[in-house]
Image: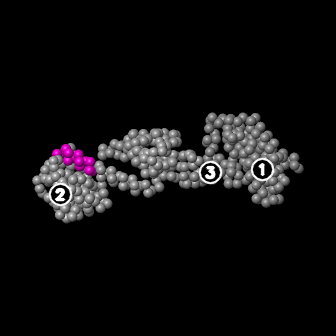
Amino acid sequence: MPKKKLLLMVLPETPMAEELREMLSDEYELVSTDEEESGLRALLRLRDRVSAVLVDLEVARENDFAFLKKVNHETLFASIPVIALLSRTPTDRDMECLEAGASDIFAPPCTAKLLLKRLSNAVRAKDSAKFAEIERILKALPSNIYMKDAEGKYIFATHYWHHLHMDDDPDWTIRGKTDLEIRRDKANARLAYESDRKLIASGKGTRYVIEINMDNQQEFLEIIKEPVLDEDGAVKGIVALINNVTEQQLLKRELEQRAKTDELTGLYNRHYFQEVLPELLLPEKYPISFVAADCNNLKKINDTYGHLVGDAYIRMSALLLRLAAPETASIFRMGGDEFLIVLPITEEAEARRMIEELKRMESLFQIKEQKISISFGMSVLRSEKDDLRECLAAADREMYKFKKMTRQDKE
């Protein structure tokens, strides 16, 4: 059976030292030194493996407990308990070794079973103190760092965020609770719980961003989770990090919106039309009506009033299209004063009724005493077998025919 942990014994060669070695050797790998200076060097060399240190109390007192004080104040040894040993019953005077840094005093009578248990308790107590100190330090960071056990129950969390459901008890703790019990947003609670179950089953970490809209506040939280493994490589818990990435996500959304939106009109742009085309042509969206639109007399307005008024004319035309088109429509500014309206699940008759409504509403819009005038043309794509380019070309042809007729009427 492999040795579990390393135990450093800073003891002179006495019958007590020999007896201790006999009692502990089945459970621990022992490293023995007979003086404090060599014991300190051994501790520096082996600190990552040492579970506890045993020292002779009487010998430590001779040097005013310098060894205990050194180990107690050195950050490198913060997680290592030092046990003082006595071959007699301790007195009140012996308690001074505890003030110097000893975690406990072992004195007879002491069986092997009792000794091993007290050693285990001392190691656990020191680990708990170290964990509490680490937790206190981590609270200074803006990120929420937390741990869960293999059942998805919290072991600790450095911060309590506002979307938790907590009672009025000032001593309320997250420990021992699952997301399903404490999260106010149940959809994200279920997402977190299912993510935990998947991680524990697979042993693979995960990373994702959630959106929370609560208390009139929009937040985006980045969740990073990794498994905690035991000595055999089995998943025994989760360590995770929550970062508030609201500013980054809002900026990302803004950039994405700008990339697909025409700056002048706020409509979708031509680039986005090409990007979203596969989604527009999904089988369940047929028949699809395409309405081409083009502003009339824009050149005249630009020549008469300038391009700022011409831009206003284009913006007003875009507003007209938005007002008259159904919510299911997608509207694109294809360039200049050219627009395209895509109407899913729309037959020709319905599309033409929309065009009639657009023409009726034109008289409500004017700029510099010039009424808005738009030419329209349309075509229908009835199935995936139809040619999209020909459909768009047909809508353009009808639109230009309409524009030509409008020009002739004015002449």
**Which stretch is magenta?**
111-123
The tag earlier along the polypeptide, 2 or 3, is 2
Under circle 3, the secondary element is helix
The tag earlier along the polypeptide, 2 or 1, is 2
Q: CA distance from mark 3 to mark 1?
A: 25 Å
Q: Is residue 209 left or right of residue 232?
A: right
Rendered image: mark on residue 295: 1
Q: Is residue 346 left or right of residue 42?
A: right
Residue at 42% x, 39% y is 197
The spot of residue 62 in percent (x, y) is 17, 63
Residue extending furthest right? 411
Q: Which residue is mark 3?
A: 257
Q: Nearer the viewer, residue 208 or 287?
A: 208
Confirm whether residue 9 shows in the render.
no
Q: Nearer the viewer, residue 12 or 172?
A: 172
The spot of residue 117 in percent (x, y) is 23, 46
Q: Which residue is mark 2?
A: 56
Residue at 30% x, 46% y is 231
Q: Nearer the viewer, mark 2 or mark 3?
A: 2
Residue at 26% x, 63% y is 70
Look at label 2 and name its amino acid: Asp
Q: How many marks?
A: 3
Look at label 3 and name its amino acid: Gln
Badges 3 and 1: C-beta atoms under 8 Å apart?
Answer: no
Q: CA distance from mark 2 to mark 3?
A: 72 Å
Way the structure is coloured: one colour
